[in-house]
Amino acid sequence: MNDAGRSRSSLFLMEMIVTILFFSLAAAVCVKCFVSAHMMGKETYELNHAIAIATGYAEVMRGTDGDIDSIMEVFPDAVKGDDSYIMLFYDSDFKACDADSAVYAGDVTLTPNGAIQNMHVKILRVEDASVIYELNATKYINSIRG
């Protein structure tokens, strides 16, 4: 009778080990799903804001005379590089900030081509300079520039 009790407790112990192993595997799969969902949500958040910011730059260029100075009037926090380049910095909430506390940056380059003004916008992460979103925009100007 003692051997039968041991065999039942051994069987119960094996069943518990298999159950714990199954739930451990299920928990690992669920954690991986939650982590990847969190990462996709963060990337989507960044992309949506980057698209809105880049589109805003293009709309300002199209709504003004298309030069750097008119864009600087709308974005006074921008840092002007030369007559065809500005850079804007954003914190983690995509609010304008200074370069020291920036998480994201907007890189705007204007290239005149005769009567056409070309704009290239890149929104990037500051830490690794990886591009989140790029946009090219053009505007026809009645006078030849450049």
Image (cartoon, rainbow, N blue to C red):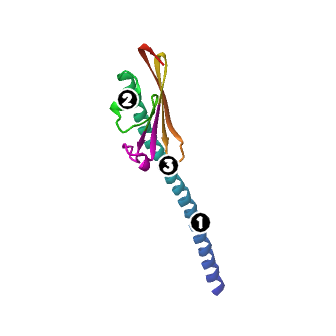
Q: Distance between the residues labelled 1 and 3?
A: 27 Å
In this picture, residue 14 sits left or right of residue 50:
right
Magenta span of residues: 88-108
Counting from the top left corner in percent of width and height, residue 122 is at 49, 35
- Which residue: 42% across, 42% down? 89
Three-letter code for the amino acid on which mark 1 is drawn: Leu
- Residue at which label 2 appears: 71
Three-letter code for the amino acid on which mark 3 is drawn: Met
Badge 3 crowding class, 10 Å Cα cut-off, few under 14, some 14 to 19, many 20 or more, is few
Q: Nearer the viewer, mark 3 or mark 2?
A: 2
Disc 2 element: helix
Counting from the top left corner in percent of width and height, residue 133 is at 49, 36
Task: Give the mark nearest the N terminus, 3 or 2.
Answer: 3
Three-letter code for the amino acid on which mark 2 is drawn: Ile
As drawn, which residue projects farthest toward the top? 142
Q: Do the residues labelled 2 and 1 touch (CB within 8 Å)?
A: no
- Which residue: 63% across, 77% down? 10
Badge 2 crowding class, 10 Å Cα cut-off, few under 14, some 14 to 19, many 20 or more, is many
Disc 1 element: helix
Q: Which of marks 1 and 3 is in front?
A: 3
Q: How far apart are marks 2 and 1 (CA)?
A: 61 Å
Task: Give the mark nearest the N terminus, 2 or 1.
Answer: 1
Badge 1 crowding class, 10 Å Cα cut-off, few under 14, some 14 to 19, many 20 or more, is few
Q: Is residue 95 within the magenta segment? A: yes
Q: How many labels sit on residues?
A: 3
Out of 123 and 71, give the one closest to the viewer. 71
In this picture, residue 74 sits left or right of residue 37:
left
- Residue at which label 3 appears: 39
- Residue at which label 1 appears: 21
Q: How far apart are marks 3 and 2 (CA)?
A: 34 Å
- Which residue: 62% across, 72% down? 14
